[in-house]
């Protein structure tokens, strides 16, 4: 019974991470689209804002999206290993 509780908890964590990853991907895509729109308006200040969005915000956001993918992979391996022990 304890192994089932652990598997259910792990499944919940994996699903939560996947949901968070999807939301961050949507935000990342929005930033990229907004930055491109600002850049193509060809206004000096807008280009600066686009640069900030792409270099500071989008870059860090992308790093977190990738980190979530890594954590999900680690949890899957742990879950597979734990299931093999039971």
Image (cartoon, grey):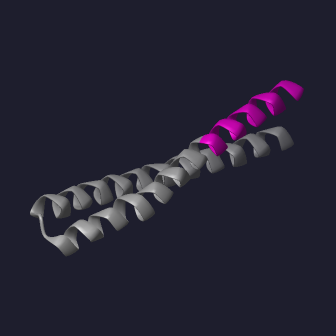
Q: Nearer the viewer, residue 59 or 76?
A: 59
Q: Position of residue 46 (x, y in %)?
A: 20, 70
Quarter of the image with the N terminus is top right
Q: From what the image shows, is residue 10 above or below residue 39?
A: above
**Residue 73 located within the stretch drawn in magenta:** yes
Q: Nearer the viewer, residue 62 or 68?
A: 62
Residue 41 in the figure: left or right of residue 71: left
Q: Nearer the viewer, residue 23 or 63?
A: 63
Asked whether residue 63 is in view, the answer is yes
Residue 22 in the figure: left or right of residue 81: left
- Residue at the image point whose x is 47% and y is 51% from the top: 62
Residue farthest to the bottom, as pictured? 45
Quarter of the image with the C terminus is top right
Q: Position of residue 16 (x, y in %)?
A: 57, 52
Rendering quarter of residue 55: bottom left
Q: Position of residue 54 (x, y in %)?
A: 36, 58
Rendering quarter of residue 70: top right
Q: Main secondary structure of the magenta part?
A: helix
Asked whether residue 15 is in view, the answer is no
**Residues drawn in magenta:** 70-86
**Residue 80 located within the stretch drawn in magenta:** yes
């Amino acid at each position: 019974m304890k192994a089932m509780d652990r598997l259910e908890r792990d499944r919940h964590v994996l699903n939560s991470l996947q949901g968070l990853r999807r939301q961050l991907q949507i935000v990342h895509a929005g930033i990229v689209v907004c930055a491109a729109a600002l850049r193509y308006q060809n206004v000096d200040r807008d280009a600066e804002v686009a640069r900030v969005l792409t270099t500071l915000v989008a870059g860090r956001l992308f790093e977190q999206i990738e980190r979530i993918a890594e954590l999900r992979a680690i949890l899957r391996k742990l879950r597979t290993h734990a299931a093999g022990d039971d």
